[in-house]
Structure formats: C-alpha cells, structure tokens
Image: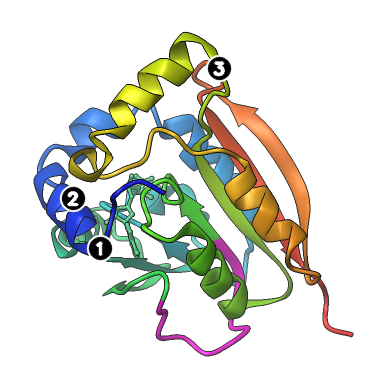
Amino acid sequence: MGELDNKAVEAAYARWAPVYDLAFTAVMGPGRRAAVAASERPGGMILDVGVGTGLELPMWSGQTRIVGVDLSEPMLRKAQERVGRDRLANVAGLCVMDATRLAFPDCCFDAVVAPYVMTVVPDPQATLDELARVLKPGGEIVLVNHVGADRGLRARAEAWLGRHGARLGWRPEFPFAVIGDWIDARPDMTLAERRALPPLELFTLTRIRKAAAA
Ligand SMILES: C[S@@+](CC[C@H](N)C(=O)[O-])C[C@H]1O[C@@H](n2cnc3c(N)ncnc32)[C@H](O)[C@@H]1O
C-alpha cells in the first residue's frame, strides 16, 4: 500500500506542523466533531491515536479524559500548546508513540479514536490490531478517513496524487476493504456504523465494536 513508512510520515508532518491548522481546521472539522460525538464517554478514558496538533481535543466534554499519541513530535508540540492555551484539564497525557506499538496494557481504554489517520499510517491493519488490543471489551474504535473512489475522475485524480503519497504524508487511494477485510478476519470485532460525512461525502466515519467479555 503506497510508499509510506514512519520516516516519510515523520518528515511530512514536520513540514506540515507549522501550517497544519491553517490548512486543515475547517475542511476536516465535521469529521472531528463526528468522531468526538461517537466516542464521548463521560467518566471514561479515550485514546486519540494520531492526535496531531490536537484540533479535536477541545471538542470532548470536560468529563471525558483523553490520552493522545502521535509519531510526530512537532505535531504533538502544537497539541501541547493547545492544551495549555485552552486549559484542557481533561487531557491526561500526550506522548510520542507509534500506533503499531502502543505502550499501554491490554483492554485499558473505553474508546479509541483515530480521526484522519488510517490513510496516513504505513500499516493500517497492524494499527487496527493494536487499537483493538488496548480497547476494553464492549468498547469502540472510531475512525474517520477519506475512502478512495472506485472509478471516474476522482479515482484518476487520487491515483495521480497517490504517486506523491510519501511526500504528502497520506494515501489518497484507500479502499474501504482495508478496514472491512480486517473486521471480517476478526471474530471479536463487528462493524457498528459506516457513514459518509461532509464536505461532499469525502470522508467516512466507521465505528467498530469489540465484543463484550464472555
Ligand atoms: C492527518 S493527521 C490527523 C491529525 C488529527 N487527528 C486531526 O484530526 O487533525 C495524521 C496524524 O497521524 C500521525 N501518524 C502517522 N502515522 C502514525 C503512527 N504510526 N503512529 C502514530 N501517529 C501516526 C501523523 O504524525 C499525523 O499527526
């Protein structure tokens, strides 16, 4: 899947960090709000994977505690500034961490969110395995990401952009099957919701539920 690796991602987001909020606050706002609404757990603990500059952090209620992780230190520094500026006392921690090697025990988060991350991580299915590992039974993984078009002008534009994926820092071509096949292969996980989001149904919200403990 593309030529992304952690080094390319880190280099891309070191470039994006100073201008990220300017470029991506508005267009990706509806998806962040949808991810937060789906994962709101007053009294619970949420893991935000690929938290970036923390644009979604002020959207949770003060009763939901959040831990954010990201591969990119420059992006996390921006998130840390936001936490201080907005006095987000419910943010329990922000750590540099690879989503495929989370330093958390099994089954410790009530929900795991990853807004606009699955098209960025080099290995989406290994990432989903790790998100599922740290999720409590009965909890949900909430994803928001662009799903590539099957055909037409948009598919051709995405294929062209895809050749520059490593430099951009994301994969414009991303079939839903990457997520769907992973769910099908996991007897403990079910698709709870798949919904197109504005603007122009460019993004998709996916909720994946982990079976409750027997
Ligand atoms: C498009 S940004 C999304 C940031 C934020 N969630 C938002 O809604 O604006 C993708 C983020 O995923 C991070 N990322 C990419 N690969 C990662 C990995 N393997 N582990 C942790 N974070 C990763 C990038 O550094 C970047 O900050």
Where are the magenta residues, as a range?
101-112
Residue 116 within the segment the image draws in magenta = no
Q: Is label 1 within 8 A of ligand 1 (CB to nearest ligand atom)? A: yes
Q: Residue 141 in the image: state x and y as whole percent.
A: 62, 60
Asked whether residue 36 is in view, the answer is: no
Q: Report crowding for label 3: few under 14, some 14 to 19, many 20 or more residues within 10 A (C-alpha).
A: few
In-front residue for pair 73/154: 154
Q: Residue 37 in the image: state x and y as whole percent.
A: 61, 46
In-front residue for pair 26/124: 124
- Indicate the secondary structure of the residue bearing disc 1: helix
Side of 189 relative to 58 (left or right): right
In-front residue for pair 163/81: 163
Q: Does label 3 or label 1 sit earlier along the sequence?
A: 1
- Indicate the secondary structure of the residue bearing disc 2: helix
Figure quarter occupied by ligand 1:
bottom left
User: What residue did someone put label 1 on?
Assistant: 6
Q: Is label 3 within 8 A of ligand 1 (CB to nearest ligand atom)? A: no
Q: CA distance from mark 2 to mark 3?
A: 29 Å
Side of 107 relative to 27 (left or right): right
Quarter location, residue 69: bottom left
Side of 157 relative to 128 (left or right): left
Q: CA distance from mark 3 to mark 1?
A: 29 Å
Asked whether residue 193 is in view, the answer is: yes
**Residue positioned 47% across, 20% down in the render:** 155
Type of amino acid under label 1: Asn
**Residue positioned 23% across, 45% down in the render:** 166
